[in-house]
Image (spheres, coloured by chain):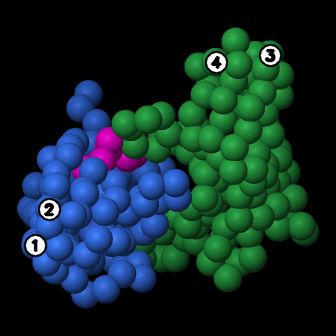
Chain colours: A blue, B green
Amino acid sequence: DAGVTQSPTHLIKTRGQHVTLRCSPISGHKSVSWYQQVLGQGPQFIFQYYEKEERGRGNFPDRFSARQFPNYSSELNVNALLLGDSALYLCASSQDSGANVLTFGAGSRLTVL
Amino acid sequence: QQQVKQSPQSLIVQKGGISIINCAYENTAFDYFPWYQQFPGKGPALLIAIRPDVSEKKEGRFTISFNKSAKQFSLHIMDSQPGDSATYFCAASIGTSGSARQLTFGSGTQLTVLP
């Protein structure tokens, strides 16, 4: 069974640029969550989507946005990149929005220069 | 109040020893406490989880001890093996009907098990 797949695995951007990260959940999972993991820290919640609707938002600026598509895949967009946005961006899927068990992908490593 | 504090930051144990990682929380509304294991280059993987109505949960060599009155919980790894070398994160979340179950993670413990 395919797990949570994320792309790209690594990318380098410069300050002020825009980035789009993609996530495909486990088949049958309808909820996708995004987390930011800065080096040496625990993941921090950014968004959760369920059935294409935003169900939760963490303490992140409006430069961060996301959406979920009819096939339950998701995109995370970050505008006007800052050096501090350099992190591992993790996508997790679950069967529904209230599910306890989250399955994480390997992440997209973003470096902002 | 949403913070989960984890200690130690790093831990070195000998093969066969017991690894103990501790976490503390403030928000008494948390109702689910998972532990995740993360290897380099991988995403976190659920290891074991507990609800606050249970004081202990054991799965193989991994045990969670939960102290509701002290608002603390810990992970014990018995007979630690070199393959257990990874970063461990405690987490906590609140279940709210119709809303996202957001995980609040601790800062992580890097465990090294020496052969």
Marks 2 and 1 sit apart, C-alpha to C-alpha, by 7 Å
User: 10 Å neighbourhood of mark 1: few (<14), some, or many (≥20)?
Assistant: few
- The stretch of residues the image draws in magenta is A103-108
Is A16 drawn above or below residue B112 in the view shown?
below
Q: Residue furthest bottom?
A: A62
Amino acid at circle 2: Lys
Amino acid at circle 3: Gly
Q: Residue furthest front?
A: A113
- Residue at 82% x, 47% y is B65
Q: Which residue is mark 4?
A: B82
Residue A17 marker: 1
Percent position of residue A89, x then y: 31, 57
Q: Quadrant of residue B33?
A: bottom right
Between circles 4 and 1, the one closer to the viewer is 1
> Dot 1: what SS?
loop
Left or right: B11, with A17 as reference point: right
